[in-house]
Structures are given as structure tokens and as C-alpha cells.
Image (tube, rainbow, N blue to C red):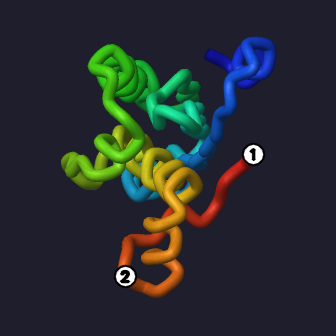
Amino acid sequence: MREQQCCDAGTDYETSVMWCEDLTRAIIDDRTAGFCKMIADRRTHKFLGAHIVGERAVETVQLMATIMAGGLTVEHVADLELAFPTYSAIILMAARDLKYKLDPEYAALYQSGMAGSPASKALS
């Protein structure tokens, strides 16, 4: 789904946008143009949509399609460990940012220094 579709359906949602300029693999390869945008349902924490643009986007979007088909939640994906450095790591970055936005307890842990950092740049 796109944000407009969520609005039209009356769905309460949250978004996260991670830029490839903050992705280690993209920096190494000097391919920093692009982004990953995720949309998640605030109630269920399931993914409603994703948009991925940039280097190896076709491969990365396949991972996101699998995540969505499997019904994984934001928390499931945020807690995954993937190979590093990879282009698909942008999915983890966005999921961790969404977890921060959706989970007040996690946000409090982050603010206290007890949890990992959400991404530094986001576009709402």
C-alpha cells in the first residue's frame, strides 16, 4: 500500500524512510542514491507497504515481499540479523526506526542508552 491508500482506507499507520547515503554498503560502493520507505499498521505492527529505490533494489524488494507474505511484524524484522554490509540491511534500518516509533518502551530504552540507535534520518 501507499500512504494515500492507507489514508483512504482509514488505516492508522506509521512510516520510516531510510536513505542509501546512510547505508554502509552503498557508501563503500559509492552508490548512495536511493531510499527505502516502509509503511506499517500502528495496531498490528504488520507491514502494509514498502518502496525501495536504488542500487540492487530488485533484490532488496524481494526480501521485503517475503517478509510481508510471511506476515512478519516490525519487531520480528527489527530483531533479525542479516549479513553486513549489504544493500538489504536498509530493511533492518527502516524496521528498527519503525520499532522505535511504534514501541514506547523500546523508545524509552533507546533514550536511556540501553537499546540500539534508530536511523538518524527519516522522512515522514
**Residue 20 to residue 54: above or below:** below
Graded by Cα atoms within 10 Å as few (under 14), some (14 to 19) or many (20 or more), the crowding at tag 2 reads few
**Residue 22 to residue 77: above or below:** below
Instruction: Report the side of 42 relative to 59 (left or right).
Output: right
* Dot 2: element: loop
Instruction: Report the side of 107 relative to 84 (left or right).
Output: right
Instruction: Report the side of 77 relative to 91 (left or right).
Output: left
Amino acid marked by disc 2: Met
| Residue at the image point whose x is 47% and y is 52% from the top | 99
Q: Which of these two is toward me, 87 or 112?
A: 112
Graded by Cα atoms within 10 Å as few (under 14), some (14 to 19) or many (20 or more), the crowding at tag 1 reads few
Residue position for label 2: 114
Amino acid marked by disc 1: Ser
Alpha carbons under labels 1 and 2: distance apart: 25 Å
Give the x, y percent position of residue 95: 44, 46
Residue position for label 1: 124
Tags 1 and 2 in contact by the CB under 8 Å rule?
Answer: no
